[in-house]
């Protein structure tokens, strides 16, 4: 299973806490992340994560490309709904391409738990 992990700055601590809680599960998946998110996650856990570019520099689009190529099984994207992002069009494109290809997408902690537990259940 190949998963993408992404968090906007105000949500990075939440994603790190989530990754620490689910570290054993995540360790069984192939992980990729946008640049800064991946760096922070690897500093805070023992997870091995393929780092794409930082979000504002094209990282969301690289993950979107993986979805279009069908090489990504799920996306956990902790978005900050209260802060404008300079690369909002890239963010929207990533959400859209998940819908185009029917790829599970979680944009908050509560849904991230369902996504991870559901994908692992389905894989058993
Ligand atoms: O901006 C992001 C997603 O839109 C995340 O990018 P970083 O992980 O590089 O901060």
Image: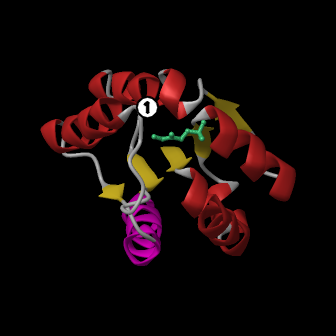
Residue 42 x %, y %:
79, 47
**Placement of the C terminus among the 4 image quadrants:** bottom left
Q: How is the image coloured?
A: secondary structure
Question: In what quadrant does ligand 1 lie?
Answer: top right
The quadrant holding residue 81 is: bottom left
User: Which residue corresponds to mark 1?
Assistant: 60
Residue 116 x %, y %:
46, 65
Residue 68 x %, y %:
28, 24
Residue 18 in view here:
yes
Which residue is located at x 41 percent, y 68 percent?
Answer: 108
- Residue 121 belongs to magenta span: yes
Overall secondary structure of the magenta section: helix
Which residue is located at x 45 percent, y 22 percent?
Answer: 62
The quadrant holding residue 123 is: bottom left
Q: Is residue 116 above or below residue 61?
A: below
Which residue ends up furthest to the left in the rendered image? 100
On screen, residue 92 versus residue 12, left or right, reads: left
Q: Is mark 1 within 8 Å of ligand 1?
A: yes
Q: In terms of depth relative to the viewer, which is nearer, 97 or 10?
A: 10
On screen, residue 68 versus residue 77, left or right, reads: left
Q: Is residue 120 above or below residue 38?
A: below
Which residue is located at x 30 percent, y 54 percent?
Answer: 104
Residue 105 x %, y %:
32, 54
Instruction: Please report the bounds of the magenta region as a residue range.
Output: 109-124
Q: Is residue 33 above or below residue 110?
A: above
Which residue is located at x 35 percent, y 29 percent?
Answer: 64
On screen, residue 114 versus residue 27, left or right, reads: left
On screen, residue 10 versus residue 47, left or right, reads: left
């Amino acid at each position: 299973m190949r998963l993408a992990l992404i968090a906007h700055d105000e949500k990075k601590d939440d994603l790190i806490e989530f990754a620490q809680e689910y570290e054993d599960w995540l360790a069984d998946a192939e992980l990729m992340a946008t640049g800064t998110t991946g760096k922070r996650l690897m500093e805070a856990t023992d997870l091995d994560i393929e780092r794409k570019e930082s979000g504002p520099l094209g990282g969301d689009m690289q993950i979107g490309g993986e979805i279009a190529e069908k090489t990504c099984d799920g996306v956990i994207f902790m978005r900050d709904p209260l802060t404008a992002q300079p690369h909002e069009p890239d963010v929207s494109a990533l959400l859209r391409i998940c819908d185009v290809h029917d790829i599970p997408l979680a944009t908050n902690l509560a849904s991230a738990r369902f996504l991870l537990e559901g994908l692992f259940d389905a894989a058993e």
